[in-house]
Image (cartoon, rainbow, N blue to C red):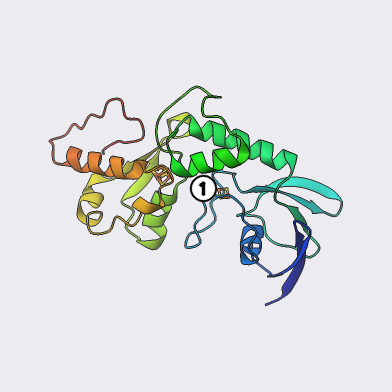
């Protein structure tokens, strides 16, 4: 496969054609923060925390490194004032949903993000989609799905499937950056043992079909 030469943070890097900037950077030990990326899954581009600055043919843009393909002569900067400011804002928005997420807290320290900048909406889920996509793409089980759109978007365990497959799997649990998933699963299990209609009050992000 064709080799590409690009520059990341001033280092000349050789990468395979078809790789993303994130993959090329990680191959040479340059860390870019991610939340919705997983090497076993199709790129998703949901969280935008992996944003970097790229310069190509004299033009500079902010792009999601987990989606952006390497190109000959591309210049990538993974830490610039613009990049850091964007990551800080993204983290502050996500912390409003999951203030106790260890990975968010760790990134928050690095980027100076404040937990209380935005009004709290503790849904605990940051909609990274790792659980939904892992279940669909790797396990082919589709025991979880997204429902609704925009600010009403939530993840949903599908009790008819999850009651049969999740107990012996649980592989999505450690992927969740907020640990929310375990609570959602336990709750869904509890709900499934009741007669419908299921009713969930006060815990946004969990619904039962
Ligand atoms: S439950 Fe966790 S893994 Fe699933 S979408 Fe929400 S934050 Fe991501
Ligand atoms: S890791 Fe690239 S958009 Fe989430």
Residue 116 can be seen in this image: yes
Vertically, is 89 above or below 146?
Answer: above
Which residue appears at 41% of the width and 42% of the height?
A: 178
- Residue 201: x %, y % from top left: 27, 25
Q: Quadrant of the N terminus?
A: bottom right
- Is residue 150 visible in this depiction of the protein? no
Indicate left or right for 175 with 185 as reference: right
Which residue extends farthest bottom? 1
Query: The C terminus lies in which quarter of the figure?
Result: top left
In which quarter of the view is residue 75 placed?
A: bottom right
Q: Is residue 120 left or right of residue 30?
A: left
Q: Quick check: 108 left or right of 61?
A: left
Residue found at x 46% / y 39%:
126
Residue at left offset 71%, top offset 75%: 2
Residue drawn at point x = 36 percent, y = 55 percent: 135
Could you say which is closer to the camera, residue 42 or residue 4?
A: 4
Q: Quadrant of residue 101?
A: top left
Q: Is mark 1 within 8 Å of ligand 2?
A: yes
Residue highlighted by disc 1: 35
- How many circles with numbers are drawn on the protein? 1
Front position in the image: 56 or 109: 109
- The quadrant of the rendered image in which ligand 1 is seen is top left
Instruction: Give coordinates of residue 189: x percent, y percent.
Output: 20, 43
Residue 24 point in image, percent of width and height: 65, 64
Helix, strand or loop under label 1: loop
Q: Residue furthest front?
A: 109
Residue 43, position as x, y percentages in the image: 54, 56
Residue farthest along the right direction in this orientation: 58
């Amino acid at each position: 496969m064709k080799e590409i030469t690009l520059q990341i943070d001033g280092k000349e890097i050789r990468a395979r054609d078809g790789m993303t900037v994130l993959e090329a950077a990680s191959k040479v030990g340059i860390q870019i923060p991610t939340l919705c990326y997983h090497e076993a899954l199709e790129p998703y581009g949901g969280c935008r925390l992996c944003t970097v600055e790229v310069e190509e043919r004299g033009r500079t843009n902010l792009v999601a490194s987990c989606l952006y393909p390497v190109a000959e002569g591309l210049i990538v900067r993974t830490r610039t004032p613009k990049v850091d400011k964007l990551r800080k804002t993204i983290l502050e928005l996500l912390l409003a949903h999951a203030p106790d997420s260890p990975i968010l807290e760790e990134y928050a320290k690095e980027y100076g993000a404040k937990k209380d900048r935005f009004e709290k909406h503790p849904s605990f889920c940051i909609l990274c989609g790792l659980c939904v996509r892992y279940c669909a793409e790797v396990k082919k089980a589709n025991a979880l799905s997204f429902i609704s759109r925009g600010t009403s978007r939530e993840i949903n365990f599908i009790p008819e499937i999850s009651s049969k497959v999740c107990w012996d799997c649980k592989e999505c649990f450690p992927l969740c950056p907020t640990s929310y998933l375990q609570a959602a699963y336990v709750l869904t299990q509890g709900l499934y043992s009741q007669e419908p209609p299921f009713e969930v009050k006060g815990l946004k992000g969990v619904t039962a079909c």
